[in-house]
Amino acid sequence: MKKLILGTAVLALSAGLALADGDGKTVRMGTEGAYAPWNFVNDAGEIDGFERELGDELCMRAELKCEWVKNDWDSIIPNLVSGNYDTIVAGMSITDERDEVIDFTQPYTPPDPSTYAALDSGLDVEGAVIAAQAATIQAAYIAEKGWTLIEFATPEETVAAVRNGEADAVLADKSFLETVVGQDGLVMLERTESIGGGVGMGLRESDGELRAKFDAAIQSMKDDGSLNKLIAKWEVSSLW
């Protein structure tokens, strides 16, 4: 759903996994913590949201000991590759470009439509200035269309740009924009864009054993219906 690959490819390191296969080590789960309802920091200062609840359940089913690490979006792939954590669980769409640098589990959600929020419900987005988070599938879409794009480092900054008149609209996952529309005159436009694939967990390409464990855990949640229950609870995408 949200994100496109960060600029240049980074060589994958063959750092040892932090697998919890009885060796006492911990799998570190990297997330952005700034993209409600997917992932965010709650009032207690803890990672929360759909992906926190999902990740904890996947770790339990995979019999892994896991901890959460917050990381800015613009360095989330390089820091995975360099070994600062072992997975990315951050609303990351599976794309061919990303797959050249890291590996992915099977998707744990179907695609979430991208849509626009603006102060004018009748805005023609094709002639407007559109804000998007840098290195996302939304930013790439606007650039490919040849429309006027302003990129920002965080989702909050894209919304602020519309509120302060720097941009006419913001393009992002519908589930994220639903958390901000209705505030300060922001409205959701009717137009939607289908530009993302399913969201999966990112891992280093050398970590095939860990990927297999999480793949099996994701499949078990699909099979017993618990994944659809979580998706419905957090309203992050359509159901499987």
Image (cartoon, rainbow, N blue to C red):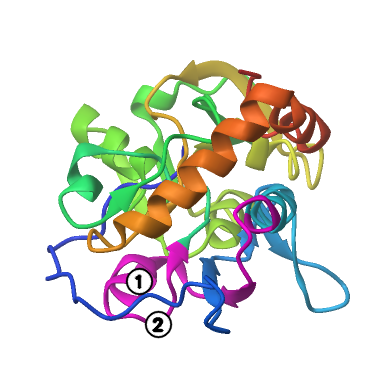
Give the residues in magenta: 59-87
Q: Is residue 169 visible?
A: no
Residue name at image x 87 percent, y 77 percent = 44
Secondary-structure class at tag 2: loop
Res 225 quadrant in image? top right
Left or right relative to 210: residue 180: right
Left or right relative to 236: residue 14: left
Res 31 quadrant in image? bottom right
Crowding near the residue tagged with mark 1, few <14, some 14–19, many ≥20 C-alpha atoms within 10 Å:
many
The percent position of residue 229, horizontal first and vertical second, equals 79, 29
Residue of label 2:
84
Residue situated furthest right in the rendering = 44
Q: Is residue 49 above or below residue 72?
A: above
The residue type indicated by label 2 comes to Asn
Q: Distance between the residues labelled 1 and 2?
A: 6 Å
The percent position of residue 232, horizontal first and vertical second, equals 78, 27
Q: Is residue 129 above or below residue 71?
A: above
Residue of label 1:
80
Residue name at image x 18 percent, y 45 percent = 97
Secondary-structure class at tag 1: helix
Verify whether residue 64 appears in magenta.
yes
The percent position of residue 153, horizontal first and vertical second, equals 43, 66
The residue type indicated by label 1 comes to Leu
Label 1–label 2 contact, CB within 8 A: yes
